[in-house]
Image: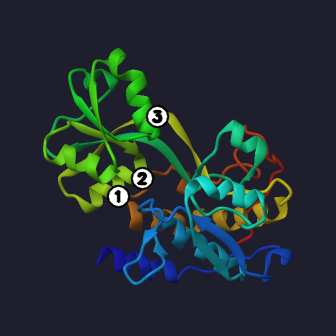
Amino acid sequence: MRRLLLAAALAALPAASLPALAQGGPPLRTAVDGTFAPHAFPRMEGGVQGFNVDLFREVARRMGREITIDSASFSGLVPALNAGRYDFLAAPVTVTKERAESMLFAEGYLYTEFQFGIRRGNASIRSTDDLRGKVIAVNKGSAYDAWAQANAERLGFTFQTYDTNPDAVQAVISGRAYAVLAGNTVVKYAASQQRNLVPDFSLRETRAHWAAPFRRDNAELRNAVENVLECMKKDGSLAALSEKWFGAKPAADDAENTIFPGYGVPGLPGHDATPHEPRCS
């Protein structure tokens, strides 16, 4: 019932007004990694579903544009964007200085950070000191695996690697590991599907923007898409989508509720500090 009410609320929200050049035009072309639940993953009847799919379909609707969303391997998305196959990427992309030097980013619509998930009833992890003597489960080859390898000896924990994140989650639920380490949105989604998993301690020093990248010569489209994202933050629809897919209400200072100054990610290459107000109907 909760998800039905959220969906109804989203459908009733007004469209955003955009600059005339952003209204209408050919379909927007974009892509996601279709294996990254809950951001994008297969539908039983075909195609993909998920937070990022819903988000950018709504962005296109408010711009008066159709949109085509391909599902492809993440490793091929940036080369395809640079080759002109896509106008931007709907897949969540972590904004780094290196990436911002070669691509143009809109402002972040989510924060990504490393988070632990624990079995319901286990004592909460309050700091990395609480990891000593514990077993941590991670997805093999991921950034979380790399963090565990780099910090296990220093912090006194051991870790187990699994081929998929769901396998790592099952290790926690079955008691083979104390906690799973993954991205915050993935942990929250897993907890919404597995009642015995609880989102726990986050590594705030790993926090970064998840944002949509564009080619560096496409500032006009970047700015138009960012205008819509800011309107969705202003009217609460972005936070509602987040709650629908991740099972938790975003905090007031989370990216879903924060309109950042200028265009792009402040402090990184490609940021345009020109002040502006989002134009919304």
Q: Is residue 62 left or right of residue 246?
A: right
Residue 89: x and y in percent read 65, 61
Q: Earlier in the sequence, mark 3 or mark 2?
A: 2
Q: Decide: is 52 above or below 125.
A: below
- For disc 2, the marked residue is 185
Identify which residue, 26 or 79, lies in the foreground.
79
Residue 204: assigned label:
3
Check contact, mark 1 vs mark 2: CB within 8 A.
yes
Amino acid, disc 1: Tyr
Mark 3 against mark 1, which lies toward the viewer?
1
Density class for disc 3 (Cα within 10 Å; few <14, some 14-19, many ≥20) is few
Q: Is residue 70 left or right of residue 125?
A: right
Distance between mark 3 and mark 2 Cα atoms: 14 Å
Determine the residue positioned at 76% across, 61% down: 222
Determine the residue positioned at 55% across, 79% down: 13
Amino acid, disc 2: Thr
- For disc 1, the marked residue is 189
Residue at disc 3, secondary structure:
strand
Residue 29: x and y in percent read 70, 73
Identify which residue, 48 or 234, lies in the foreground.
48
Residue 237: x and y in percent read 53, 69
Determine the residue positioned at 47% across, 62% down: 39
Can the viewer see residue 119? no
Distance between mark 3 and mark 1 Cα atoms: 19 Å
Q: Earlier in the sequence, mark 3 or mark 1?
A: 1
How was this image coloured? Answer: rainbow
Residue at disc 2, secondary structure:
helix
Mark 3 against mark 2, which lies toward the viewer?
2
Q: Is residue 146 left or right of residue 214?
A: left
